[in-house]
Image: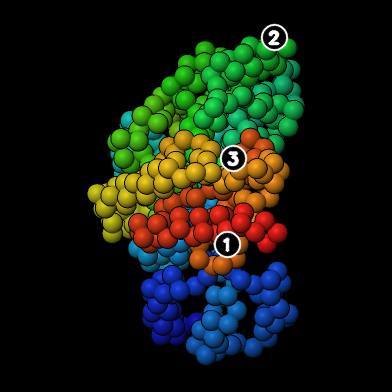
Amino acid sequence: MTPDQFRRLGHRLVEWIADYREQCDKFPVRAVVEPGAVRAGLPPHPPEAAEDLEAALFADLERIIVPGLTHWQHPSFFAWFPGNANLASVLAELLAAGLGQNGINWQASPALTEVEEVTCDWMRQLLGLSTAWSGVIQDVASTATLVALLCARERATAYSQTRGGLQAEPAPLVVYATSEAHSSIEKAALLAGFGRLHLRTVATDDALAMRPDALAAMIADDRKAGLRPCAVVATIGSTATTAIDPLAAIVPIARAHGLWVHVDAAMAGTAMLLPECRPLWDGVEGADSIVLNPHKWLGVVGDCSLYYVRDPAHLVRVMSTNPSYLRTDADPDVHNFRDWGIPLGRRFRALKLWLHLRASGAEALRARLRRDLEHARWLAAEIDDTPHWRRIAPVRLQTVCVRHEPPGLSAEATDAHNLAWVEQLNQSGAALLTPAQVRGEWIVRISIGAEATEFRHVEALWQQMRALAESCVASPSS
Ligand code: PLP
């Protein structure tokens, strides 16, 4: 494509995206296609000859792509987590691609590295973290957590890369997290070589938060058994219910036994832009690493995960390879972010966070987050005041978890009933919610925080939920 063709198609594409965003609320929230339908609309073989995209692209978008979309930017998207893609960050993504940078070292793109440094530091300030933290952007939280557990493993084994590796360790290393931790913790523990057997599930309290006494007892038992406690992953805002592990109590226990503390605040970390939310991660300054995802609630188009560490030299020691062809004279004076994570090649990811912060300003971002918290509190109060609806977890932030419990139904029938009404709601296209299992029961999560969600959307959702769930009971065979 020539720059001139790019200019013409690009202008039309930007127009198309702006129209899509303006009309997003007209679509059913969940994609209505059957599995395989998108594939069936595409030619089975790649084109031999160049196509005229100006003619074909927009038709294909309307005919094939849009019907295959679940609309994350829809104001009635209340599923999984808010996956906001603020339009300033969309433009930045285009810019990043247009600049075509690859930050394999500082010299390869000084701007890429230094904008990332500054943006990570802006975010550190906005989150209220001390200057002891150094930040880098990873692709996703799952990668950042893998990096954290690799660093934990290497610290516990005195840098086993040079001492025979993990296999040479006499005592197996143990990682601790709760049943509420995200599946990426299990994946990282497996990939980092701890093995399923040495990933402990620490008991939780009534609010599904880690019980520090249970953690301390497990560590003591493992030590007695000749094992080596290595790391604890504390979740600030669990995926299902936004449970908050008590860092202030966990950190001293971990410190006493030399454990690495990794804080998974992938979803809820954004809340720390609000000073009134920071007590939720009280104790964070004693942790070793933190991950949080601007590509969720904050509004940066995916993927963009912030990873903060207190000891960047250790991170570099674990991640660095430093072959001759990547060395430059600038190395002693700069950061080579390839040594702060797994990938060598790095996109200019900071641009989208940088432009989003500049286009919105911290004040407006804080106002939007407060709006979402207020919506969640309103919904929680409605649920509490309505017979046969039970809120199954404290509403710590923007996620509300609920179960409709009509009288006379067994636990199993209540599970089926909740799965039925939420599926009906999702199928209607009016809104999208996610069912999940908590303590063995099926519940429904309402994750509030899409950028476009206003109070009227939350109000309408609650009416739709009630209408569907309560009429489902009136005719249980439906
Ligand atoms: N941790 C928590 C608490 C999450 O809620 C999620 C995603 O929902 C993740 C980690 C994984 O995030 P990512 O998709 O960035 O790997």
**Above/below status of 357 relative to 199:** below
Task: Name the front one of labels 3 and 2.
Answer: 3
Circle 2 residues within 10 Å: few <14, some 14–19, many ≥20: few
Determine contact: label 3, label 2, CB under 8 Å: no
On residue 182, which mark appears?
A: 3
Front residue of 41 and 392: 392
At 70% from the left and 46% from the top, the residue drawn is 413
Choose top left, top right, bottom left or bottom right for residue 425: bottom right
Point out residue 262 in the picture as x, y percentages from the top left corner: 52, 31
Q: Please, what secondary structure does the residue beneath circle 1 have?
A: helix
Q: Is residue 97 visible?
A: yes
On residue 224, which mark appears?
A: 2
Q: Please, what secondary structure does the residue beneath circle 3 have?
A: loop
Point out residue 361 in the picture as x, y percentages from the top left corner: 26, 53
Q: How many angstroms separate mark 3 from mark 2 (CA)?
A: 28 Å
Q: How many angstroms separate mark 3 from mark 1 (CA)?
A: 24 Å
Point out residue 64 in the picture as x, y percentages from the top left corner: 60, 79
Q: How is the image coloured?
A: rainbow
- Indicate the amino acid at tag 3: His
- Indicate the amino acid at tag 2: Lys
Q: Earlier in the sequence, mark 3 or mark 2?
A: 3
At 62% from the left and 24% from the top, the residue drawn is 202
